[in-house]
Image: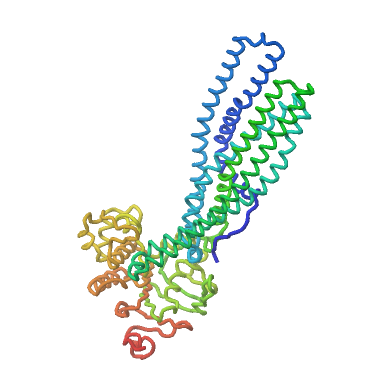
């Protein structure tokens, strides 16, 4: 069963899986890090300049001349100019690199989502997917840009500061830096808690999005049952959970920040205490002590930047983790390694000992079904709800794979042909019509990308849709609204049928294709479908038996498989299940 894999990834694995996306833009990354190193020059140079001037003044004040001060000021001014230019590149190109990485990851994620089977979407809320593909990956952008910079800058400042301070006094430097390992240990532990809280927040945000989407898409049902108060209460519960989780996340962040600030204070106290004692004993000069304090200040400022970045780092790592959870969801239905293009000859469809059960609830629908649909035959499927009619049709384009047996088209096992060639050979009008947000023409053209307006209009005429389309305010350029809300059920159904007319496939699957039409439209569509089905293999599912009375053969599906088969007249003469369905006998 396809389902999002939720598991705990190690930090090493997350960074290893993320690295290829970053390495694709290694030139931008390396130059960004080079600019990051340039921005540290000012921070590192200033304490050195101040230490030099202080020591010089302490030894002989006359050596501190106006010319020397001007040269030092000019040197620092040049460094500040370099810093400004480098920071511009980091702010602009560094973020652009993050956007490129985000775009690549979103492309891969959407590509993977498109290849996941119906089973995955049956078990996953769209709202949670939307959260992963939008806000989660936005956090990855910030992570991709800032993470290398911040840690690289911190590394440079720590190493350079350590070397410079050791040159002044190794013992004092070791005393000041002694608390750094403890700070790192507690910071890592507290960061794990912050990351766990971040992930919980993301999960709850997805649930909240799904709750909102469910309520808004079903707003007509909500209003029809006057259930606004119920929906508000449901939302309030989810919203309160989100508030609680976010509160805990900020508590974890506050603990993390407090810990680092305490270590900051400890480093300052150690520097003042130990540095003062060293100065009293003559172990260091006044200039060196000034340099110590300034370098410790730089390190503490760097630590604080890392702390401030910790929340962003945690969000970015969580975004990568949630990205990988979807990317690691297996694609149940894919091309076989040796898959070939489907070669259409006569369009004979054979079900050989086919069984099927749904992977999520193991509901067994089809049991050792044997069925041969002859080339060009118009086969109708009827029976009680849950008998497997729609399931049988869904197996042909491989929306699901059989759990037993094999389906052949012109003698070719459909699991050994490419999905694209298989589905290109099949036209489907489903019971649940879905129209994309766009114009009428765009929705019809979905059946044949690049179709001319003339082809679109001809397909609409065949589907009996041309008259109502031209009556719309902008005709074929009229906007249908989200999910086609601006059209009636019958109008949406006819546009869906026009889509199949335009595709003009050799195999037709009509799942309640006329269920939403009035009697007049039904008659019109019946004639069009009869015309379209000539020379094509057609499977029609219908509850309204009047629509399939002229079918070449009618199959009545029962719990144990095919209960009856024959023409309309033959089945009526048997006075069995079909006879009772036709006459409305319970």
The colour scheme used here is: rainbow
Q: Nearer the viewer, residue 174 or 479?
A: 174
Q: Is residue 74 left or right of residue 179?
A: left
- Image quarter where the N terminus lies is bottom right
Question: In the displayed structure, would residue 153 be above or below residue 437?
Answer: above
Q: Nearer the viewer, residue 218 or 562?
A: 218
- Image quarter where the C terminus lies is bottom left
Q: Is residue 260 left or right of residue 555?
A: right
Q: Nearer the viewer, residue 146 or 118?
A: 146
- Count the marks: 0
Question: To which quarter of the image does residue 279 belong?
Answer: top right
For the question of whether residue 429 can be seen, the reply is: no
Question: To which quarter of the image does residue 294 belong?
Answer: top right
Question: To which quarter of the image does residue 532 belong?
Answer: bottom left
* Residue 319 drawn at (x, y percent): 55, 50
* Residue 86 drawn at (x, y percent): 54, 28
For the question of whether residue 528 can be seen, the reply is: yes
* Residue 222 drawn at (x, y percent): 36, 67
Q: Is residue 441 left or right of residue 400?
A: left
Query: Residue shown at 31%/66% (left/top)?
Result: 493
Question: In the displayed structure, would residue 80 be above or below residue 123?
Answer: above
Query: Residue shown at 32%/86% (left/top)?
Result: 584
* Residue 390 drawn at (x, y percent): 42, 73
Query: Residue shown at 56%/47% (left/top)?
Result: 316
Q: Is residue 162 left or right of residue 7?
A: right
Question: In the displayed structure, would residue 370 be above or below residue 401?
Answer: below
């Amino acid at each position: 069963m396809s389902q999002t894999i939720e598991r705990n990834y190690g930090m090493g694995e997350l960074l290893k899986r993320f690295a290829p996306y970053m390495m694709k833009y290694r030139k931008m990354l390396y130059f960004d890090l080079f600019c990051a190193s340039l921005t540290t020059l000012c921070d590192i140079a200033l304490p050195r300049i101040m230490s030099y001037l202080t020591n010089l003044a302490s030894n002989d004040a006359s050596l501190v001349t106006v010319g020397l001060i001007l040269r030092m000021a000019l040197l620092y001014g040049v460094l500040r100019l370099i810093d400004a230019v480098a920071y511009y590149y980091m702010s602009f190109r560094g973020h652009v690199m993050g956007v490129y990485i985000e775009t690549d990851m979103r492309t891969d994620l959407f590509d993977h989502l498109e290849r996941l089977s119906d089973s995955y979407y049956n078990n996953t809320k769209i709202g949670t997917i939307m959260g992963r593909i939008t806000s989660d990956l936005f956090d990855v952008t910030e992570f991709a840009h800032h993470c290398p910079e911040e840690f690289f800058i911190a590394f440079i400042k720590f190493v350079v500061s350590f070397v410079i301070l050791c040159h002044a006094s190794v013992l004092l430097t070791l005393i000041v830096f002694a608390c750094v390992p403890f700070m790192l240990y507690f910071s890592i532990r507290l960061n794990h808690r912050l990351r766990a809280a971040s992930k919980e927040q993301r999960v709850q945000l997805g649930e909240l999005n799904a709750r909102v989407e469910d309520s808004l898409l079903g707003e007509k049902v909500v209003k029809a049952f006057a259930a606004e108060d119920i929906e508000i209460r449901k939302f309030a519960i989810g919203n309160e959970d989100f508030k609680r989780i976010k509160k805990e996340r900020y508590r974890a962040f506050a603990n993390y920040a407090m810990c680092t600030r305490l270590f900051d204070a400890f480093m300052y106290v150690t520097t003042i205490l130990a540095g003062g004692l060293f100065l009293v004993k003559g172990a260091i000069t006044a200039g060196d002590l000034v340099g110590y304090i300034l370098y410790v200040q730089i390190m503490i400022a760097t630590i604080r930047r890392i702390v401030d970045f910790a929340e962003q780092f945690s969000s970015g790592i969580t975004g990568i983790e949630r990205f990988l959870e979807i990317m690691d969801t297996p694609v149940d239905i894919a091309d076989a390694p040796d898959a070939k293009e489907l070669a259409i000859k006569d369009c004979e469809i054979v079900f050989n000992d086919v069984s099927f059960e749904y992977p999520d609830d193991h509901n067994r629908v089809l049991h050792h079904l044997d069925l041969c649909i002859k080339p060009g035959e118009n086969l109708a499927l009827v029976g009680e709800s849950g008998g497997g009619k729609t399931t049988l049709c869904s197996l042909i384009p491989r929306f699901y794979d059989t759990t037993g047996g094999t389906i052949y088209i012109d003698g070719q096992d459909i699991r050994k042909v490419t999905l694209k060639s298989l589905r290109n050979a099949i036209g489907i009008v489903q019971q649940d019509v879905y129209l994309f947000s766009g114009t009428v023409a765009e929705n019809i053209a979905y059946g044949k990308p690049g179709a001319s307006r003339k082809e679109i209009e001809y397909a609409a005429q065949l589907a009996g849709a041309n008259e109502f389309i031209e009556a719309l305010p902008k005709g074929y350029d009229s906007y249908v609204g989200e999910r086609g809300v601006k059209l009636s059920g019958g109008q949406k159904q006819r546009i869906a049928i026009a889509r199949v007319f335009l595709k003009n496939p050799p195999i037709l699957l009509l799942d309640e294709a006329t269920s939403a039409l009035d009697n007049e439209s039904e008659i019109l569509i019946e004639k069009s479908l009869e015309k379209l089905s000539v020379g094509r293999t057609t499977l029609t599912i219908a509850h309204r038996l009047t629509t399939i009375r002229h079918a070449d053969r009618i199959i009545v599906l029962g719990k144990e498989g095919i209960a009856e088969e024959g023409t309309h007249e033959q089945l009526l003469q048997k006075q069995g299940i079909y006879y009772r369905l036709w006459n409305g006998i319970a």
